[in-house]
Image (cartoon, rainbow, N blue to C red):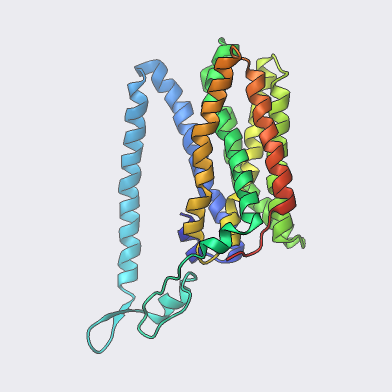
Amino acid sequence: MASIVSRHLTASDKGRVFGICLAGSHFGSIVAGGIGSLLIDLFGWRSLFHFVGMISFIWYLFFERLTDSVLSGRRARVVFDSGGNAMQDESLIESDHFIKKKPSKGVIVATAVPWSKLFRHPSFWAASLAQYCGANAYFTMFSWLPYYFSDNFPQATAFVYNVVPSLAIVFTSLCAPYFASKLLTHGCSITFTRRFMESVSLIGMGTCLFLVSLSSRFTISLALFTLAMALRGLHHAGVSVNPHDFAPDHTGSVFGIFNAFSAITGFIGVYMAGWILHSSDNQWAYVFIFTALQCIIGAFVYGLKGTGSRII
């Protein structure tokens, strides 16, 4: 998805459209958490997997139909030379922003990614650390919130705490790119905009998690977690779109490496939270304070070294 957005959109539209795409994953959490809770209560746990499989199959049919119509339009724009060899139409070639240069016979030339230059740049590692710290907070909340609420507030309705926090992050994920666009149109640099959005996200999440460790009421805890999830959505106008800034010609490849830091914490962070709970006899405050400290560290480092400038 990052590669498609980078190839076919202008620089001013990339962050906004990519933020909308990323909001789709959070919307899926709402569907699975909301409808899934009802299905499990009514028909058992197997019904959730049946439901997810069914909507995935429906999506596949829709996507197949959509891509067929798009590809048929592209085939109509293919021209042939005197020898009968297929060549891209001139207008189609000019519309592809990802082409580094246009050879004489319409062949797309892909250049190698200068990984060594990227890995030596401190801003890349600052962004990677911020990505890790923010994802650690998100996955800790996403994975452990149902258990936290059922453990501390067993009378609470599962539908509420499974849906409300995820609903908040969908809203801010959609709004965050527009907030960033407003900052840019008012003369703020890309670097300042990225640092500001990511720092507000990380510091805000850290503050909410610290306050949750002091809470003993369901409504307050739910409100703080909802606010923390909402602040996580601002990340989609910060570090999340940094690969488009770092490497406009290699966004797909760089995003794959960059996003690995999120995948790593999806395992390590969740495991560490479980280990802390096991070692401390279910002291949730330790988990939240530990996670909050990581958010503050990530915000500090990215605020100093983060950039929105091109690296490669």
Outermost residue to the bottom: 82
> Where residue 57 appears, x then y in whole percent?
31, 41
Q: Against 168, is 48 above or below?
A: above
Q: Residue at x 63, y 18 (%)?
A: 284
Q: Nearer the viewer, residue 300 or 233?
A: 300
Whether residue 247 is visible, yes or no, is no
The quarter in which the C terminus is drawn is bottom right
Q: Residue 219's quadrant in the figure? A: top right
The location of residue 95, given as percent across then percent down, is: 47, 73
Q: Quadrant of residue 187?
A: bottom right
Query: Would residue 298 be seen by someone viewing this image from the given angle?
Result: yes
> Quick check: 45 above or below 173?
above
Q: Residue at x 68, y 46 (%)?
A: 198
Q: Is residue 263 left or right of residue 289?
A: left
> Would you say 47 lies left or right of 239 here?
left
Side of 190 where 152 appears, left or right: left
Q: Quadrant of residue 149?
A: top right
Instruction: Name the residue rendered at 62%, 51% in the picture.
Output: 125
Q: Nearer the viewer, residue 81 or 257?
A: 257
The picture places residue 148, in percent across and down from the top left corner, at: 57, 18
**Residue in the image at 34% along x and 24% along y:** 47
Q: Could you say which is closer to the camera, residue 22 or residue 117?
A: 117
Residue extending farthest to the top is 155
Residue 58 place in picture, x, y as percent? 32, 42
Q: Name above or below for residue 237 compared with residue 50.
A: below
Number of marks drawn: 0
Give the residue furthest to the right. Answer: 187
Decide which of 152, 304 is in the foreground and name it. Answer: 304
